[in-house]
Amino acid sequence: MELQSISRISKQFDVSARTLRYYEQIGLIEPIKTKGLTRIYDENTVLRLNQIIILRKLRIPLKQIADILNSGKADVAIEIFQQNLKEIEDEITSLSTIKNVIKSFLSKLNIQTSELQLLDDVSLLELVDSLTVSKINFKEDKSMDDLNKANETLSKLKNVRIIYLPPATIAASHAFGKEAEEMASKQLESFITETGLAKIKPDLRWYGFDAPFNDDLEKHGHEFWVTIPDDMDVPAPLIKKHFEGGLYAAHTIAFGAFEEWGDLHEWAMNNPKYEGNGGSKAEECMWGCMEEHLNYINHIGLPSSDYEMQLDLLFPIKERNK
């Protein structure tokens, strides 16, 4: 039986190590053994991962993938596939209708004069109005209100929030190398478990960031923070630090949508009221930017309860000088 490391599996399937660790957290896969802090996978786990990736390409949600693989029963898979097929057929019907309406608009425009009259066609407008937005898979826009305001926004993002993160005492875990994120996470999770931190501080918060980011994985680093009581001792190799807090632009993503960092950066750089404020936080790397694991306390207590983990992307900002 051939055993493979997480870095090798990551390259083989073109899946990030973060995604693989998340699949472990929600119970979709598990390593056959751990050698130090390095995850090792056997052939059965590799086969299961391949099945997961195939089902994800078919747009099956992770919770339903878990139901299919864990049950091992054909009737469970049939019910889930039928449900997803119905949703896809509804979407196809909606898109087909849109296609035909646009074709009709084009035909009318080709025979009209310079005046735009196609929007006077009541029957066509009624047909379009009957479409349900939820049946149309918009890549970025979530509602008709968003569509109407599309040209008024600074960027693709529609849900940036301005939040204040309070100062806090934190326990920091830092690691370097190919599996820096995994190692730093393991160290901090062990600390949380051994100290019973979730019970001592039920309002704890979990942050993470590249420190430093480097395409050369051997030189790549990652750091995680968890907020702790001010008087709590922190054992090595963890470090006790003070987080100064501050104002941040926050954008929520489903785990894995890290490409939206670029959109948040664009939002911050082009906002008329706010500007970036990473200067004083430069030592934290990522120009002071962080990611917060939302509702981390439930992740600790119920690791398989939420199959669609959410993160807040946090960009440090300040008000522009008037």
Image (spheres, grey):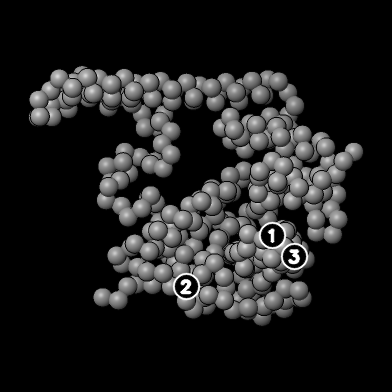
Q: Residues within 10 Å of mark 3 (few under 14, many from 20)?
A: some
Where disc 1 sits, the SS reads loop
**Nearer the observer, 91 or 178:** 178
The residue where tag 2 is placed is 278
Q: Which tag, 3 or 1, sits closer to the chain's start? A: 3
Visible residue check, residue 305: no
Q: Quadrant of the C terminus?
A: bottom left
- Which of the numbered marks, if any, corresponds to residue 299? none
Apparent side of residue 115 relative to residue 217 in the rendered image (left or right) = left
Of tags 2 and 1, the one toward the viewer is 1
Apparent side of residue 313 relative to residue 179 in the rendered image (left or right) = left
**Nearer the observer, 282 or 158:** 282
Q: Which tag, 2 or 1, sits closer to the chain's start? A: 1
Where does the image place residue 278, in percent across and percent down from the top left? 47, 72
The residue where tag 3 is placed is 187
Identify whether 127 is placed above or below 294: above
Where does the image place residue 178, in percent across and percent down from the top left? 72, 59
Q: Which tag, 2 or 3, sits closer to the chain's start? A: 3
Identify whether 5 is placed above or below 223: above
Q: Residue at x 36, y 53 (%)?
A: 155
The residue where tag 1 is placed is 217
The amino acid on which the numbered mark 2 sits, given as a three-letter code, is: Gly
The amino acid on which the numbered mark 1 sits, given as a three-letter code, is: Leu
Q: Residue at x 49, y 56 (%)?
A: 261
Where disc 2 sits, the SS reads loop
Real-space Cα separation, disc 2 to disc 3, in angstroms:
27 Å
Seen from this angle, which residue lies furthest right? Answer: 1
Q: Residue at x 43, y 39 (%)?
A: 139
Where does the image place residue 107, in percent across and percent down from the top left? 22, 19
Where does the image place residue 257, in percent across and percent down from the top left? 53, 48
Q: Residue at x 36, y 29 (%)?
A: 132
